[in-house]
Amino acid sequence: MVRAISLMAMTGGFLAISPNLRDSLLGGYNQAGLTMDQNSPYSYIALGAAVVGALMVFLYKSSQQR
């Protein structure tokens, strides 16, 4: 948990000091949102299925014995 929080903090700090990367990232999010609006509701269904699939893979791998 501490590792995940520290990685998010480092990412946030890096985005705070790098305006070019921040603008590129926000532009990509904006373009993705506009593209999803053009293809809705199917794009939202596909996004939901992808998130559920990713969670299933993540939770299945984390429950395996080591």
Image (cartoon, rainbow, N blue to C red):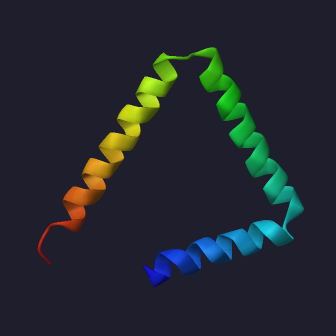
Q: Quadrant of residue 48?
A: top left
Residue drawn at x 57%, y 80% is 6
Q: Position of residue 4 (x, y in %)?
A: 49, 75
Q: Is residue 3 left or right of residue 58?
A: right
Q: Is residue 41 left or right of residue 19?
A: left
- Establish if 25 lies above or below 53: below
Q: Is residue 30 above or below residue 36?
A: below
**Quadrant hosting residue 20:** bottom right
The quarter of the picture where the N terminus appears is bottom left
Examine the rendered structure and indicate whether residue 35 appears above or below residue 24: above
For the point 47% across and 17% down, the residue is: 42
Q: Is residue 18 left or right of residue 33?
A: right
Which x, y percent locates residue 8? 59, 71
Q: Quadrant of residue 66?
A: bottom left
What residue is rendered at 77% in x and 66% in y?
15
Residue 25, above or below 34: below
Q: Residue furthest right?
A: 19
**With 4 as the anchor, is 28 left or right in this view?**
right
Q: Residue at x 78, y 42 (%)?
A: 27
